[in-house]
Every structure is written in structure tokens, then in C-alpha cells.
Amino acid sequence: MATTALPPDTDADIARVTEALAMITPRWNVRIMLALSGPPLRYSELAAKVSWLQGGQLHPKLKSLCDAGLVERTEHTARHVTYGHTERGAALLPVLPLIVTWAEEYLETAERPLPAIEQIEDSLTLLTRRHAAALLWALKTREEVSGRALARIVMPDSDWTNVYPPLRQLVADGLVDTEGMGRPYRLSAAGDGLGPVLGTLSAWSAGQLLNQAAHHPVWGHPQAKPAAKPWVSSQSRPSPAGLPPGRTGEPAPVWHNRELFSHATALRPKTAVPVGGPRR
């Protein structure tokens, strides 16, 4: 990621969050992580849980998650190999319900009810747009900023007009507002509502307790919101053993396939957001 003109600690924070998002956003990565929520699985057992992956697709995905330090491969014997979360991978799971909570409130209503896993994937796509994290940080710290000023902050070594394509994308996604050409930019309600998600990702990427998100210097102290719903991938499996009770400051979530991979009828109906709201 290119260096910004933000303070060094803020610049490092943005880089860490961008890297964390890059680990989980590639297609199927979150679904594989959720499928591993429980005791370690043999390759064939995991393949059966993610059967939509074509032959040969699972292995490189697992390798990339292992390389990222989110999944570990354990060779018990030459014929007995299992895959499971690392402690770091298990610690990331509580971020996912926060993303679902945000998506339910702010994402544009779809023609059909979406399962939680698709809400997560849609939200991650918005957050991993080029320069998105740096622009969101800059707008959060400075409220209203002109395009030229944003360019000096986010891409100081580039032609200032290069800021407009990512800005226009964030406006189209509903995370940033402006009153028109030449007018300043500011976070929309949806962009500002990302505070708990980005603060928690920051805490995780820095190796802190997740409850430190409330003290994040930019995204901390969000308005009180209902607690995120629990999402579990297996009714009969315990929470990952690799996550100590004190790791996140709160119990690890449990994940249900029926709620993540198919629409849960208990979810509240979504209302259409005004023009400019996040697009899927």
C-alpha cells in the first residue's frame, strides 16, 4: 500500500487493516474459515462442507489461508493430515457478525433475502476498493474535505486528479457523500456506521483484544447499538479450542450453517435505503 500523508501511526493502522481485509476477501475464503469453525478436519471432510468448490480449487485456497496465518495444517501421520484455525484465525471470527449487523442496517435491499454469508462478502467487496481504507480514515478524521485536499492526504506522491475515480466509486457504493462537482466530500451514514467493523479489524490486526475497538483513535466510541447476533456453522461443535477465553474480551461466537449459508427467516425485514445508499 502506498504511504499517505497521514500520521505514521495512522498510516500503519490503515496498512494493517488493508492487509487483514486482503486475507479474507478473496472468493470463498470466508466460507472456508466458517467451515473450519470446530474441530480440525481432514481435507476430504472440509471438501464435503464446501462442495461448491470445483476440483483443484480448495487446495490453493487452503494454502493461501495457511500462508496468511489463519489456518494451520497438522500432519499427524503421512496419511492423517488435518486443517483447523490458528489462534489468530479463530480470533478473527467475531468480526464477521459485526459485518452482518452493518450490512443489515445499511446495504441496499436486494430483490431476494440474502443469507448472512453473502452480506459479509458484499460488504468486504466495498471495503477493499482501491484506496478505500485511506479515504475513509481521512474523511473520518477531517469530516468535510475537498477532492484536492484528499489527494494530498491519501496519495501525496501521485497526480491529485487520481483521487477522483476511487472517490466516485465510494460515492456510488454509498459510503461517501458529496453535493456535486467541486463540493467537499464527507462520510455518509453508512460510511460512518463502519466504525465498529473497522475498529475491530484494527484491534485484531494489531494483535489487541477486540474490545479495544471502542478505544480506537479514529473509529472508537461508536453509538450504542444492539449486540451482534450469534452466527454458528455447526450446531454440535464447540467453539474453536485455539481461542482462549480472555483472547477477545468476550466469548467466541458460535456459527450456524442455516443462518450463514441460507437466509434466516428470523432476520428483520430490510427497508430500502435512500438514493446514494450502499450498492451491492
Image: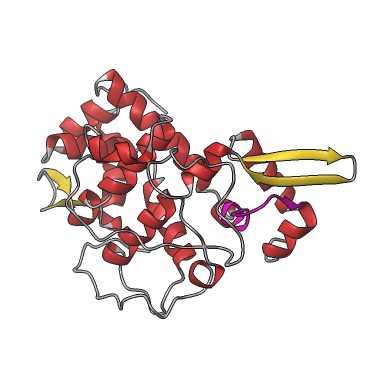
Can you name the residue that lies furthest to the front here? Answer: 245
Location of the C terminus (image quadrant): bottom left
Residue 4 visible? The answer is no
* Magenta stretch holds residue 41: yes
Residue 222 appears anywhere in the view: yes
Q: Is residue 179 magenta?
A: no
**Left or right: residue 253 compared with residue 241:** left
| Residue extending farthest right | 78
Q: Is residue 161 above or below residue 114?
A: above
Q: Residue 62 at x, y = what percent?
A: 68, 45
The foreground one among 56 and 47 is: 47
Residue drawn 29% across the image and 61% down it: 278
Q: Position of residue 155 (x, y in %)?
A: 30, 28
Can you tell which quarter of the image residue 63 is in? top right
Q: What residue is shown at x 59% (from left), y 64% (from top)?
A: 234
What residue range appears in magenta?
32-42
What percent of the width, then of the height, locates residue 106?
27, 63
Going by the image, does 107 lie left or right of 43?
left
Q: Nearer the viewer, residue 226 or 122?
A: 226
Residue 5's x, y, as percent?
25, 22
Check the picture and name the quadrant holding the N terminus: top left
Is 75 left or right of 140, judged from the image as shown?
right
Q: Quadrant of residue 102?
A: bottom left
| Residue ranking furthest to the top | 8
**Colour scheme in use:** secondary structure
Q: Nearer the viewer, residue 110 or 120?
A: 120
- When the figure is inspected, residue 117 is found, relative to residue 165, above or below; the finding is below
Instruction: Give the number of callouts.
Output: 0
Note whether 156 is above or below 238 in the view shown: above
